[in-house]
Image (cartoon, rainbow, N blue to C red):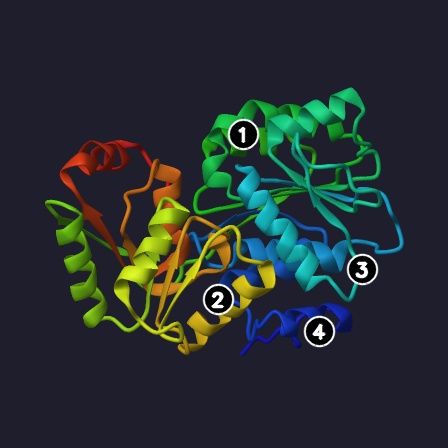
């Protein structure tokens, strides 16, 4: 059995991995982490939630020269929220290697000494062209969540061309790799191997329960929780999450609430409690979904768009995804179901 200790990972990084609660690598981490750290260019396809982003984080931490304060790795994310989550993962896992990752946006101040630059493709391209960031020392480009990157195909191609003099490694990771990205990558002057990881766990089962009003919705939620001892309940707003936490009248050690105002350390404690089974139910808004896992996800509020629905049902859920649909939600639910998706 492969362990993190049996992989080519330094002691300082192993310590960070252990402190973050990772016990053994997932199949995708086994398949590609050492290859990325070793300089291989890859197409990696595996289902959402399989551990691709953690594989990236571990690989780039191992790869970066901590004594060099220049940008060495560029990671492209489809959304700034995902970039921030990846930045936090790198900082936590790499705390004993003193690597510096920065998710760059219009509102984020520049961090001197950044070694791993993360951001949305078109924004980073603009900053590179303007000279705001110097990427002349970068030698790696990694595209995370490639299944969402088709709309950035042009920017990614321009960004690769802009940095091509120094880049010697490109990696694309996603549940699928759009053909437009494959075409651009094949034009790049490196050999790219393909890795496809088929996960053993079954697909998420999707259920919709129609409810007439909020009273019936609350009743249905109670019925669902009575027969499930592990669930994450998603709300669209902090006010709804707080109302629900109060209305369910469950002890705090059984049911807790998490939103964007909660301190990161307290969020981590709740996530760990949910994973261990000490906490049964977590009511939350769409915050830091990359760390959340549950066998049942209940969408008390219908998401505002497909990508939020996919975050909840494919990143977080490990079994059943239940949507509680009022008459006023039907048009939004139909739009979500009718929107083409890549997973």
Residue wearing tag 4? 15
Residue wearing tag 2? 271
Disc 4 + disc 3, Cβ < 8 Å: no
User: In this picture, is 272 found above or below 84?
Assistant: below
The answer to which quarter of the image holds residue 322 is bottom left
Q: Position of residue 214 (x, y in %)?
A: 18, 48
Q: Residue at x 28, y 73 (%)?
A: 229
Mark 4 or mark 3: whose residue is earlier in sequence: 4
Helix, strand or loop at disc 1?
A: helix
Of discs 2 and 3, which sits in the foreground?
2
Q: Position of residue 100 (x, y in %)?
A: 77, 51
Helix, strand or loop at disc 4?
A: helix
Q: Residue at x 65, y 69 (%)?
A: 17
Mark 1 or mark 2: whose residue is earlier in sequence: 1
Using the numbered discs, state the Cα–Cα distance from disc 2 to disc 3 in whole angstroms: 25 Å
Using the numbered discs, state the Cα–Cα distance from disc 1 to disc 2 in whole angstroms: 40 Å
Residue wearing tag 1? 183
Using the numbered discs, state the Cα–Cα distance from disc 3 to disc 1 in whole angstroms: 36 Å
């Amino acid at each position: 059995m492969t362990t993190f200790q049996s992989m080519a990972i330094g002691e300082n990084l192993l310590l960070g991995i252990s402190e973050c609660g990772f016990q053994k690598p997932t199949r995708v981490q086994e398949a590609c982490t050492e290859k990325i750290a070793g300089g291989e260019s890859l197409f990696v396809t595996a289902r959402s939630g399989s551990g691709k982003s953690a594989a990236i984080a571990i690989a780039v931490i191992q790869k970066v020269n901590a004594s060099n304060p220049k940008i060495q790795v560029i990671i492209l994310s489809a959304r700034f929220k995902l970039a921030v989550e990846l930045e936090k993962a790198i900082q936590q896992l790499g705390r004993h290697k003193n690597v510096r990752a920065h998710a760059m946006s219009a509102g984020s101040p520049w961090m001197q000494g950044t070694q791993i630059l993360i951001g949305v493709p078109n924004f980073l391209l603009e900053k590179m062209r303007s000279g705001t960031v110097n990427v002349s020392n970068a030698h790696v480009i990694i595209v995370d969540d490639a299944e969402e990157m088709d709309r950035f195909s042009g920017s990614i191609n321009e960004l690769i061309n802009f940095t091509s003099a120094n880049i010697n490694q490109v990696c694309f990771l996603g549940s699928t790799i759009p053909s437009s990205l494959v075409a651009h990558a094949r034009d790049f002057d490196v050999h790219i191997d393909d890795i496809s990881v088929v996960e053993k766990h079954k697909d998420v089962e999707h259920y919709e329960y129609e409810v007439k009003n909020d009273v019936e919705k609350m009743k249905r939620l109670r019925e669902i929780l009575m027969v499930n001892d592990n669930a994450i309940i998603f709300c669209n707003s902090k006010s709804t999450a707080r109302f629900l936490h109060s209305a369910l009248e469950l002890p705090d050690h059984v049911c807790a609430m998490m939103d964007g105002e909660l301190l990161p350390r307290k969020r981590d404690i709740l996530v760990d409690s949910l994973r261990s089974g000490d906490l049964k139910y977590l009511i939350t808004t769409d915050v830091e979904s990359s760390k959340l896992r549950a066998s049942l996800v209940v969408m008390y509020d219908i998401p505002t768009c497909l990508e939020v629905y996919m975050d909840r049902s494919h990143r977080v859920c490990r079994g059943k995804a239940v949507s509680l649909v009022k008459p006023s939600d039907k048009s939004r639910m139909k739009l979500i179901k009718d929107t083409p998706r890549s997973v």
